[in-house]
Image (cartoon, rainbow, N blue to C red):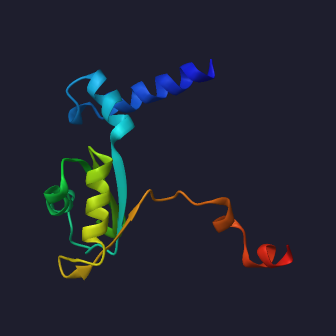
């Protein structure tokens, strides 16, 4: 039952983003190979199109997301770029980190949000051991 929920969740994600994929098989195939990178310190005036254009020189950009501040209707200063191939994402991460985009130096990181358990421990807990 749990495996079925995982598959049905994957299918839902594929169909909800159907505009980016020609078929369900392509969606499931790219889901395993696609790689997302985190980009911070973006200019407030950046758009998803400009972000995708800046990173497209490194490979096929499946999706570019700019996180918006709804109250001010501008970029919060960070976003995500999803590449079709993991190798392309690694190359973009290495080359674009520290570069200037629309007048601001951007910082690029692979696999945002993945932290080891050692990173999550507070300094006080670590020193007590």
Q: Residue at x 86, y 76 (%)?
A: 128
Percent of width and height locating residue 77: 34, 71
Residue 87 in sight here? yes
Q: Residue at x 62, y 17 (%)?
A: 1
Residue 69 in sight here? no
Q: Quadrant of residue 85?
A: top left
Q: Residue at x 24, y 77 (%)?
A: 99
Q: Residue at x 73, y 78 (%)?
A: 123
Q: Could you tell whether 126 is left or right of 71 in the image?
A: right
Percent of width and height locating residue 89: 30, 55
Q: Could you tell whether 95 is left or right of 77 in the image?
A: left
Tag count in the figure? 0
Percent of width and height locating residue 62: 24, 45
Q: Quadrant of residue 51?
A: bottom left
Q: Quadrant of residue 53?
A: bottom left
Residue 54 in the image: above or below residue 126? above
Q: Quadrant of the C terminus?
A: bottom right
């Amino acid at each position: 039952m749990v495996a079925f929920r995982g598959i049905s969740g994957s299918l839902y994600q594929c169909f909800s983003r159907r505009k980016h994929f020609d078929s369900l098989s392509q969606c499931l195939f790219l889901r395993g190979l696609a790689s997302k990178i985190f980009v911070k310190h973006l200019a407030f005036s950046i758009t998803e199109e400009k972000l995708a254009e800046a990173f497209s020189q490194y490979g096929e950009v499946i999706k570019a997301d700019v996180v918006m501040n709804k109250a001010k209707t501008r970029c919060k200063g960070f976003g995500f770029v999803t590449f079709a191939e993991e190798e392309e994402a690694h190359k973009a991460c290495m080359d674009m980190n520290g570069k200037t985009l629309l007048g601001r130096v951007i910082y690029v990181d692979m696999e945002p949000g993945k932290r080891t358990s050692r990173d999550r421990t507070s300094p006080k807990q670590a020193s007590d051991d």
